[in-house]
């Protein structure tokens, strides 16, 4: 039986204030195409469907369209909620969509839902475990010796599963597994309290993980599929892919990656302002890091002629620190002339304008603007 494993869709996410719904729509279409080209029997979606517990109407509409297209191919679909999701919202229509082969994990109540499939090698059981914390486990009646231990909480929950060792077993799970390489855009737990060793999952043939954004194997049977799109500049160098998992007879698991074609690449470019203005035009999403001595006055218009999708603009000091940066360019573009002048004054002088200075600058600007208009 062949599965397509994805996770961390983060539908509705904005990168440096820039909306990514169109890019997400593009890569989700590639998922549907891969299901068909790889003749997948089922799709595993391991959490963080949305970027927020209360997603926008546009985000929910995109995911609904995606599920409809997937279901139209005839595959079965298995979904769990991640730490960014609201378990109640994700599973709200679970009883209805199950009629079309879409299985969504219910909010954690102490049990782990499972679905049994059948192929030429016998039964194959898929277990759906949404993101859990120790407090979730304690709230449904389990006793934990260490009330903050994610590892103990996971062991307690998995020990309650009626696992048949002679059958093939897959687990969908959204947690941080010890040894996983983080990319900088995931939520971190202080002191590594959320670490769970891969040995906890040794009874499963394949653990379809979500949470970390880089595709990677952990231990012998656990794998993060990673995100379909880079959601931070720390993911620039990651090769985004879809994971294809094929289970033959018990003990025979084959995994391969199918590359994702990004509608816009994400890159960081460090150079002088004048040099950047002479670059070949690029449709990439970029962070431009200037190496000039001071930030040029109003650098965006010229740079946007070359890079129409600038997400971040900053000035680099000689010691490697960022001296000044525009984080939210979407907000910057909506600022008034007065706000721009105040920002520039503070950048050059290290203090805010006084009320008298602000009135003086506005008066000069209005005079100049009036002359220009005449």
Image (cartoon, grey):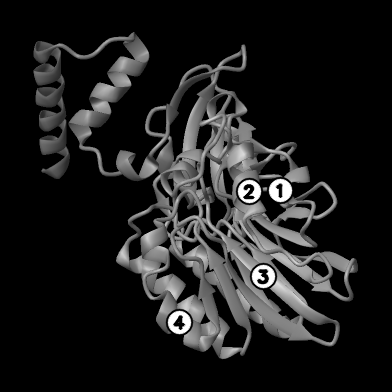
- Residues marked 3 and 1 touching at CB (< 8 Å): no
- Residues marked 2 and 3 touching at CB (< 8 Å): no
Residue at image location 32% in from the left, 38% down from the top: 332
- Relative horizontal placement of residue 216, taking residue 58 as reference (left or right): right
Q: Secondary structure at mark 1?
A: loop
- Residues marked 2 and 4 touching at CB (< 8 Å): no
Percent of width and height locating residue 114: 61, 70
- Residues marked 2 and 1 touching at CB (< 8 Å): yes
> Reading the chain from its start, which is encountered first: label 4 or label 1?
4
Percent of width and height locating residue 210: 62, 53
Could you classify mark 3 by the number of other residues whose Cα lies within 10 Å: few (under 14), some (14-19), or many (20 or more)? many
Residue 158 or 226: which is nearer the viewer? Answer: 158
Q: Which mark is residue 126?
A: 3
Measured Cα–Cα span from mark 4 to mark 1: 34 Å
> Reading the chain from its start, which is encountered first: label 2 or label 1?
2
Q: Which residue is mark 4?
A: 97
Q: Is residue 59 above or below residue 132?
A: below
Q: Quadrant of residue 283?
A: bottom right
Measured Cα–Cα span from mark 2 to mark 1: 9 Å
Q: Is residue 7 above or below residue 351?
A: below
Q: Which residue is mark 2?
A: 213
Q: Which residue is mark 1?
A: 238
> Reading the chain from its start, which is encountered first: label 2 or label 3?
3
């Amino acid at each position: 039986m062949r599965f397509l494993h994805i996770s961390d869709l983060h539908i509705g996410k904005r990168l440096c204030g820039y909306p990514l719904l169109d890019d997400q729509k593009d890569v989700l279409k590639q998922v549907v195409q891969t299901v068909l080209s790889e003749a997948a029997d089922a799709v595993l979606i391991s959490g963080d469907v949305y970027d927020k517990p209360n997603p926008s109407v546009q985000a929910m509409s995109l995911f609904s369209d995606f599920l409809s297209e997937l279901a139209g191919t005839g595959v079965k679909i298995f979904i769990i909620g991640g730490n960014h999701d609201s378990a109640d919202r994700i599973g709200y229509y679970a009883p209805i969509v199950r009629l079309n082969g879409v299985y969504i994990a219910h909010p954690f109540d102490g049990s782990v839902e499972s679905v049994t499939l059948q192929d030429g090698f016998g039964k194959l059981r898929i277990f759906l475990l949404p993101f859990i914390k120790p407090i979730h486990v304690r709230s449904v009646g389990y006793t934990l010796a260490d009330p903050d231990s994610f590892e103990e909480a996971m062991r307690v929950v998995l020990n309650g599963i009626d696992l048949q060792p002679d059958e093939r077993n897959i687990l969908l799970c959204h947690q941080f597994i010890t040894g996983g390489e983080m990319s900088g855009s995931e939520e971190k737990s202080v002191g590594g309290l959320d670490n769970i060793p891969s040995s906890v999952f040794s009874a499963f043939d394949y653990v379809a993980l979500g949470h970390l954004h880089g595709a990677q194997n952990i231990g012998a049977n656990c794998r993060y599929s990673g995100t379909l799109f880079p959601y931070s500049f720390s993911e620039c160098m990651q090769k985004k892919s879809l994971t294809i998992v094929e289970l033959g007879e018990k003990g025979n698991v084959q995994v391969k990656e199918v590359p994702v074609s990004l509608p816009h690449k994400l890159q960081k470019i460090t150079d002088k302002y004048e040099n950047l203005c002479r670059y070949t035009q690029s449709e990439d999403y970029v962070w431009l890091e200037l190496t000039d001595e001071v930030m040029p006055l109003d650098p965006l218009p010229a740079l946007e002629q070359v890079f129409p999708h600038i997400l971040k603009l900053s000035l680099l000091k000689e010691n490697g620190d960022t001296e000044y940066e525009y984080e939210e360019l979407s907000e910057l573009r909506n600022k008034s002339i007065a706000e721009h002048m105040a920002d520039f004054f503070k950048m050059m002088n290290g203090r805010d304008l006084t009320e008298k200075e602000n009135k003086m600058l506005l008066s000069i600007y209005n005079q100049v603007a009036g002359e220009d208009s005449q």
